[in-house]
Image (spheres, rainbow, N blue to C red):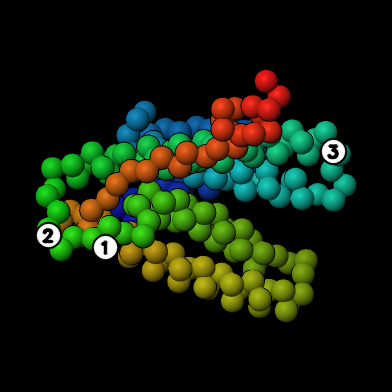
Amino acid sequence: MAFSNLCNEIFDKSVSDYHIADNIDAEMKNLYTLKTIEYYLYLKNWIDAVQWHLEDIIRDPQIEAKSALGLKRRIDKSNQDRTDLVELIDSYFFDKYKNIKPLPTATINTESPAWAIDRLSILALKIYHMRQEAERKDTTVEHHAQCQSKLNVLLEQKKDLSVAIDQLLADIEAGKKYMKVYKQMKMYNDPALNPVLYAKK
């Protein structure tokens, strides 16, 4: 099975599972073996699904300031969790291909495998929700047509991105591409690097 097929299968399952309860506080039931790539892919998409809905909720114009602040803190934590998990998935590939000797002509890709997979995870959510909009019965013909058109683009994007991910992994395995794992080093979460935080010490 192509790796993108595995990703898409797991992402679709996670999205479907999340929407059974459709609640940001629902318990994740990740049935994949702990610390396997399948487990991490499911966890990645579940985090994305929860954050998707957090982003919806915080945009409610009637939301109370205290609730909004709590949600903002939760979104910040979610973003850090997402980044950490992407780096973990990249470490999986780095270890998998550690014995591959790059060809003299090998080049580095503009993004790592895991960051491309991150985009594929988000696409699974976009497709699910755009399909919901395209199938709504309480809206106009124009709304339906616009959403169906956008859904078609998203499905094409999913196909293209899946091919690109598989090609990137094949190129790394063949020594045509090489990868590095860079930590994001986000400064605003670090009390030693965020001037607003260390100024209060």
97 over 146 or under it: above or below: above
117 over 133 or under it: above or below: above
Q: Earlier in the sequence, mark 3 or mark 1?
A: 3
Q: Residue at x 13, y 48 (%)?
A: 100
Residue, far front = 199
Q: Position of residue 177 (x, y in %)?
A: 22, 58
User: In the figure, residue 147 lies in which quadrant?
Assistant: bottom right
Q: Position of residue 157 (x, y in %)?
A: 46, 68
Residue 20 appearing in the image: no
Amino acid type of the residue that numbered disc 3 sits on in the rendered structure: Ala
Amino acid type of the residue that numbered disc 1 sits on in the rendered structure: Gln
Q: Residue at x 61, y 58 (%)?
A: 129
> What number is the disc on residue 167?
1
SS category of the residue bearing label 2: loop
Q: Which residue is mark 3?
A: 65
Q: Is residue 100 left or right of residue 88?
A: left
Q: Residue at x 37, y 37 (%)?
A: 88
User: On the rendered image, what quadrant is the C terminus found in?
Assistant: top right
Badge nearest the viewer, 3 or 1 = 3
Residue 85 appearing in the image: yes
Amino acid type of the residue that numbered disc 2 sits on in the rendered structure: Pro
Q: Earlier in the sequence, mark 3 or mark 2?
A: 3
Q: Position of residue 117 (x, y in %)?
A: 40, 52
Badge nearest the viewer, 3 or 2 = 2
User: In the figure, residue 90 lies in which quadrant?
Assistant: top left
Foreground: 137 or 184? 184
Q: Residue at x 45, y 33 (%)?
A: 30
Q: Which residue is mark 2?
A: 104
Q: Earlier in the sequence, mark 2 or mark 1?
A: 2
- Mark 3 in CB contact with mark 2 (< 8 angstroms): no
